[in-house]
Amino acid sequence: MLDFSVVINTRDHPAELRRCLAALKNQAYGPARWEIVVVDDGSCNSAAEQEVNAYGGPAECRLVRLGARGRSGARNAGIRAARGFRVLFLGDDVVAEADLLAAHHEAHGRRGRVAVVGHRTERSRVSSRTFLSWWDNLRFQDIRDPENATFAFFYTCNCSVQRQALLDVNGLDENFTCYGWEDLDLGLRLEKRGLRVVYEPRARVSHHHPDVKLEGLCRREYEMAFTAVYFFNKWPEEPLVQAIPFGREAATLGPPGPAWRKEMGRKLVRLAEALCPLPALLEPLYRRLVWAHRAQGLQDGWGHYFPLLERLEKGDIREDEQGRCFQR
């Protein structure tokens, strides 16, 4: 059996996928001991397949093609296709250091049955430090105990878990239909099955995004609030979930307001970035803009998830639906 299956989900990001695969050619880990599984989650063309065919690296690289199933569905397809003892999840926009697999392998060897989360460094081009403070939302510096980082730091852009452990909890919950919280939900369910989440800073990747735009930040914050409705209401009795600051802040948000106000907010931020990019001015503008998109995401998320949450609360879930991970 292979040691690792590196699972990379992608959708319409051929340039990022090319960079990700190119870095994996340099792994200082025996090529006969690992493989790459690229899951194309409904790309509009065959560019991902072309990148996989052109890989030419030392390890085998395979493609799994799906319709648009979302991040959770794509990663679940990768888990099912994997032939490795462990699955290492990577984002298609990350670049692995040459000893990434070796660092994950050593971390598992020293600790036994754990989930290993590695480090990610932001390398994206951004307009200001204030923008970066909102965009880079992985707070590794907040990990108090690397030997028990907890599910709150289970980031699937660079983490490895025994494949069987993932199968035992039915993988990721596919009710998370867009960005946000699906990895923390998986980490919590793994913890409840006895897996400890550990942080290994020597297992490093860097996040490369050519030009992060304001629209991308706003879309991410909207989606994160949208799926937060499901996450925080799926775990209403879990104190560590309810203690996450996002949930407490979201409870204070008012109505999102009309769309023109958000557009006006984006124009004000762009103007301030161009003319006077001082943190004292930018920070309140970013906060108001981000919170407006979060408020919209919460409102739309409630409309989407309320029937599902009502069924979950009543236990009205059919047996054939359990594979989608309604369980807590």
Image: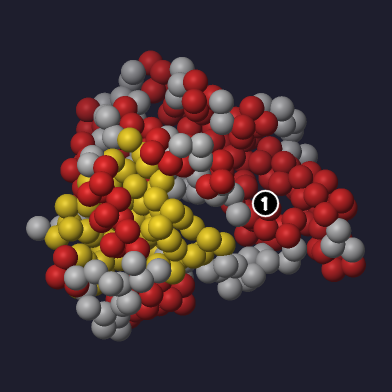
Q: Residue 291 is drawn in which quadrant? A: top right
Q: How many marks?
A: 1
Which residue is at the far left?
A: 1
Taking depth in this image into account, of 194 and 293 the one nearest to the observer is 194
Q: Residue 37 is drawn in which quadrant? A: bottom left
In which quadrant will I find the C terminus? top left
Query: Can you give x and y, in whole percent of width and height, for residue 283 in the image?
Result: 80, 49
Taking depth in this image into account, of 159 and 46 the one nearest to the observer is 159
Q: Secondary structure at mark 1?
A: helix
Q: Residue at x 19, y 72 (%)?
A: 31
Query: Can you give x and y, in whole percent of width and height, for residue 21 in the image?
Result: 35, 74
Query: Can you give x and y, in whole percent of width and height, for residue 231 in the image?
Result: 48, 32
Side (left or right) of 156 relative to 114: right
Side (left or right) of 38 relative to 252: left
Taking depth in this image into account, of 58 and 106 the one nearest to the observer is 106
Residue type, mark 1 in image: Trp
Taking depth in this image into account, of 100 and 274 the one nearest to the observer is 100
- Residue 137 visible in the picture: yes
Q: Residue at x 72, y 31 (%)?
A: 253
| Few, some or many residues within 10 Å of mark 1 (<14, 14–19, 20+) | some
In which quadrant will I find the N terminus? bottom left
Q: Residue 314 is drawn in which quadrant? A: top left
Side (left or right) of 56 relative to 201: left
Q: Residue at x 58, y 73 (%)?
A: 210
Q: Residue at x 40, y 35 (%)?
A: 148
Which residue is tagged 1? 134
- Residue 171 visible in the picture: no
Q: How is the image coloured?
A: secondary structure
Residue 26, above or below 102: below
Query: Can you give x and y, in whole percent of width and height, for residue 194 in the image?
Result: 27, 30
